Amino acid sequence: MKKILKLSLISICLLNIVSCNSDGLNKYRRNGQLVDLDYLTLNDKLVQDESFVFYLTSEGCPGCKAFYPEVEEFLKENKEMTLYTLKKDDISEVDKLTLAAYYADTLGNSYFTKNDLNSLSLYTPSICKVVNGEFVYAQIGHLNKDVVSYMYQDNYLSFDSYYMYNRKVQKKETFNVFISKNGDAEYDASLREYFINNPSYSGYYLNIKDFDESENERLLNRINYYLGEENTIEEYPDYCLLQYEDGKLVNFTNIKYDSSSLASIYNK
């Protein structure tokens, strides 16, 4: 009788994997707020240029277990949000390398630890924001409800192309752009921390070294048009801020911002 009961339970799990998930988030799966992905579906969403947030988890991961109550709290407070989840254990070794390369490309040098400089490992728990099929931000470890909430904000993300920046200009939006000429993982991280802690503020980030020559030239021409003939610059400073109002450049500041100087911008 016990054997029959055990087999019945296994059959139920096989027929309805969601109900047997061990993370305690099943009710959010049932109401559609939490959606389990496999890697093939994730890749399809990227190819179709979709925008979404997903987190990566794995069996036996202590950090993942600590993260699940934070996920539950977020979903409880944000019933209109959909969060996706992907299990590292179900991904093939080849696909793990591909996904790790996405992480590395998004986070740059900050992705690698001092003891792991040459590998493309997948770390759990981690959470990723995808915009129009592109990874724009990821965070690894020490995840909480605030980090999840941040992923759904449009107040800060790294532009991964000149096109994304130019589209905001063409749409005549009002926004601030923080520029790093050569890329700076610490600067990027400090900006993110500020905007995580100040979710009502808006800011964006450009890494000029990722632009091609024509894109660099077009952006530099825009800056010089604003500065006027007597103040033109031949190349970007290491750090600067561009402030736009209704799609027009209204301020150019040559400075590397920290939390104090950022506050001077946003607390006027």
Image (cartoon, grey):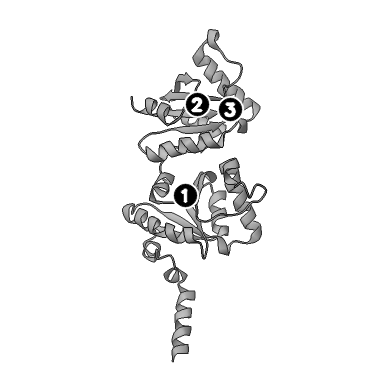
Q: Is mark 3 on a helix, strand or loop?
A: loop
- Asked whether, in this view, residue 69 is left or right of residue 117, the answer is left
- Residue for badge 3: 181
Name the quarter where the N terminus is drawn: bottom left
Write down the quadrant of residue 28 in the picture. Answer: bottom left
Separation of residues labelled 3 and 2 (CA atoms): 11 Å
Contact, mark 1 vs mark 2 (Cβ under 8 Å): no
Contact, mark 3 vs mark 2 (Cβ under 8 Å): no
- Asked whether, in this view, residue 17 is left or right of residue 180, the answer is left
Write down the quadrant of residue 5 in the picture. Answer: bottom left
The vertical placement of 154 against 126, above or below, is above
- Residue for badge 2: 256
Residue 71 in sight from this viewpoint: yes
| 10 Å crowding of disc 1: few (<14), some (14-19), many (20+) | many
Q: What element carries label 1?
A: strand
- Where is residue 102? Give x, y as percent: 59, 47
Outermost residue to the right:
118
Separation of residues labelled 1 and 2 (CA atoms): 31 Å
Earlier-in-chain disc, 1 versus 2: 1
Q: Which of marks 1 and 2 is in front?
A: 2
Earlier-in-chain disc, 1 versus 3: 1
Q: What residue type is labelled 3?
A: Lys
Residue 155 in sight from this viewpoint: no
- Residue for badge 1: 52
Q: What residue type is labelled 1?
A: Phe
Image point 43% across, 54% down: which residue? Answer: 83
Separation of residues labelled 1 and 3 (CA atoms): 29 Å
